[in-house]
Image: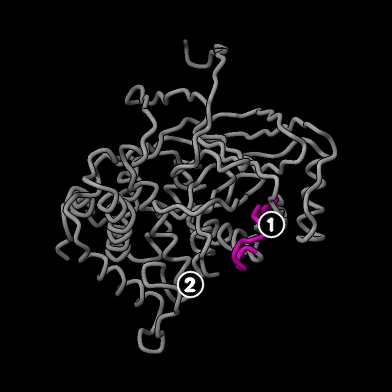
Amino acid sequence: LRSGDSVRIRTPFLTKLPTYTSRGGHIDQSYMACQWYPKAAVYDRKGWHPMPYLDMGEYYNDFGNYDVRITLPGSYVVGATGVLQNEDERRRYIELGTSGYATPYTATAPEKTLHFTARNVTDFAWFADKTFRIRYDTLQLAPGKPVIDVFAFHHDEAVAGWSKSTDFIKSAVRSYSTLIGDYAYPTVQAVEGPGNKSSGGMEYPMITLINMPKASDMELDVVIGHEVGHNWFPMMVSTNERDFTWMDEGFNTYYENLYSVQKYNTLLVLGSKPQPMERIGSTDNLLKLVYTFMNDMKTTQPINIPATSFKNDNEYGMVSYHKTAVWMHRLETAVGRDAFRAAMKLYFREWQFRHPYPEDFQRTIQGLFRTDLSKYFADLNTAGPFAD
C-alpha cells in the first residue's frame, strides 16, 4: 500500500463482554464497552506494533475517524467517544442534563440506533445504562473558540460530588489547556462506573470511566482531572503506552499534581485535607516537599522500561506514575519552572496527533536550553531513588 493510498478491510466479529473487570465488561444490565473491537496495529517509523490486551500495561493506538452505530433497547442512556448525531436524542440528553437531574430518562421506542462520530481519535468506547442520570454544561476556553459540550453520567446512589461533576470536568479542561495546549475535541465526558481495586478510572478519547464510589469531593475532582488529562497524553499526543508508560501516566501525574495543589493545597497521596500552607509557604514549596518524599519510595526499577518488565502492580504504579513525576520536577528545577512549562507546550504543539518516542521528547526539550540535560535523561534508566 503506497503512502496516500487506501484499502478497505471488512471483517465480521463477535465480542462477548465479560463480567466487569479492570477496564470494561458488564454488571447485570449495565455495560462498559471498552477494548471491544479489533484494532489495526500501529505502523510507525520503527515498524509494526501489534499487542495483545494485558491487565498491566496499556495500549498504542493510531489516529482515526470513527462512525459508529449502536442498536440497543430504547430505555438505555449511552455515553460514548464522539458526538451523538441523533439530534432528538441529543436534545433530550441536554434537556435532562440542564433542567432536572431528578428526571429519569424514559424510552420513546422499544429499540433505537444511536449514531456517534469522532474524528482524529485513538480509540472508541461506549457506556450504556438504563439508570444513568445526566448532567450537562458547556465550556468555551476563550471568546471566539469552539463551545465544548460537557456531559456527566452517574447513578442515583452516587456520592454527592457527582452533583459538581461537570464543574470538575470543566476545571480540568481549563487547567490542562492553559498548562499544555487547547483541548481539541468537541465534547468531554465522565461516566460513573463500579468500584475498582486496581484504579480510580480509565481514560478514553472524549470520555472517561470513573471508579470511585466512596470518593470525597476533592478525590473525585482530582481523579476526574487525571482521567480527563489523558486526552492530552496519550490521546492527542499518542505514545506507545506499553513500552513507554511514563510518557503518558507520568506526564499526566505531574499535571494532576499541579492541578491538585493549585486547587486544594494538597495531593491525593497526602489525603484530601489541605496542608498547612502558613508553615509550608507556597504550592511550589509543597510540591518540592512531596517530590522529595516520593523520591525515597521503595522502588527498585527504572522509569524507561516496558510495562511488561515491571515486577508487580505496585512497582509499575509507583515508578510509571510517581517516580516519573519526580523526574519531571527535577527537570523543571534544572531549567526553571516557566521555561520547562513552555517547553512542554512546545512538545505538545510539535507532536499533537503524532507518535513521539523518548528521543523525540528529549530533542524537543533539549533544543530550547543551552544547559546539557543529558544526565537527566540518562536518569530515566536509573533504578531506585535519584541521587539528588
Residue type at mark 1 is Gln
**Residue 380 to residue 272: above or below:** above
Whether residue 250 is visible to the viewer of this picture, yes or no, is yes
Whether residue 148 is visible to the viewer of this picture, yes or no, is no
Front-most of 188 and 185? Answer: 188
Determine if the magenta segment contains residue 206.
no
Q: Residue at x 44, y 50 (%)?
A: 346
Q: Which secondary structure lies at badge 1?
A: strand
Q: Position of residue 193 (x, y in %)?
A: 55, 51
Front-most of 37 and 360? Answer: 37
Horizontal side of residue 356 vs 210, given as left or right: left
Front-most of 106 and 199? Answer: 106
Q: Quadrant where the C terminus lies?
A: bottom left
Numbered mark located on residue 140 in the image: 1
- For label 2, the residue is 262
Q: Position of residue 222 (x, y in %)?
A: 49, 63
Give the mark nearest the N terminus, 2 or 1. Answer: 1
